Image (cartoon, rainbow, N blue to C red):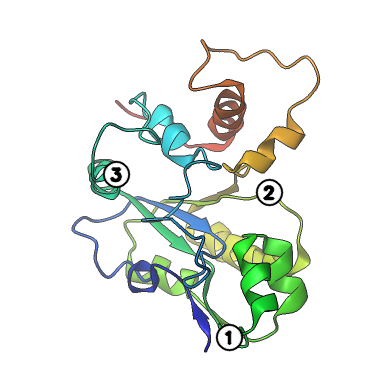
Amino acid sequence: MACKHKFNENLNLENLDFEPEVLIVGTFNPAWPENNQATWFYGRTARNYFWDVLPALYVEPGLRNSSWQDKPAAWKEFCSSRKVAITDLICCINDADEQNNHHQLLLSDYSDSNIVNHFKDFEFTDVVGLLQQFPSIKYVYLTTKGQIPFFNEIWISIENYCANSGVRCRRLLTPSGSARYQIPEGFVPQFPVYNGVLANFILENWQKEWHEQNF
């Protein structure tokens, strides 16, 4: 059985109740490894700081450890209020087999390199098609600067479309815990520690690429 994206029904932005201005693009979130506890995009919050960093760009409190009982509702409410849409590049890995223990192990590591090195048959989200469908989108961000050729090729085509269409397109430092390997020795946060040094480091990197806010 192929491995679909866990939130496949949201990848084409069909459930939005607003006109998006920002599109954030990740890589893939697998549906069937048993250890995938994500309840929405970037939802494995023990190792991912997305829901702290994104609100901080808008000078709003972090939502990663929100007191909301229904955290996905808080995340979706934030996105609606700031006109931010989220999708991923891959919507399905067709040659992944749920009954194959090795495939389960590979996908449960949530590694982009595992995806491209061990699988070959993919279905992709038509990001350019989404930009054409939603001309209100003026800013597009990929949440990885990793130089994996497979993803680079896909992303470059999106960058080229954006360059020809007046859409700002940038790559962001990963919001996952692996960003800690990029913290330079002696790093001192510019701001009071915002949910930890790592979250601050990611935030400062995102601020360099993010569009200006008009509050």
Residues at circles 3 and 1 in contact by the CB criterion of under 8 Å: no
> Of the residues under marks 1 and 2, which one precedes in the sequence?
1
Residue at (38%, 67%) from the top-left corner? 7
Numbered mark located on residue 145 in the image: 2
* Residue ID at (31%, 45%): 75
Pointer 3 residue? 71
Numbered tag placed on residue 99 in the rendering: 1
User: Between residues 110 and 171, which one lies in front from this camera angle?
Assistant: 110
SS under mark 3: helix
The local secondary structure at tag 2 comes to: loop
Q: Position of residue 117 (x, y in %)?
A: 77, 73
Amino acid at circle 3: Lys
Residue type at mark 1 is Gln
From mark 1 to mark 2, how far is it between C-alphas?
A: 32 Å
Reply above or below: 74 against 161. Answer: above
Foreground label between 3 and 1:
1
Residue 192 at what x, y percent from top left? Answer: 51, 10
In whole angstroms, how far apart are the C-alphas of marks 2 and 3? 27 Å
Q: Nearer the viewer, residue 133 or 205?
A: 205
Q: CA distance from mark 3 to mark 1?
A: 31 Å
Tell me, yes or no, if residue 181 can be seen here.
yes
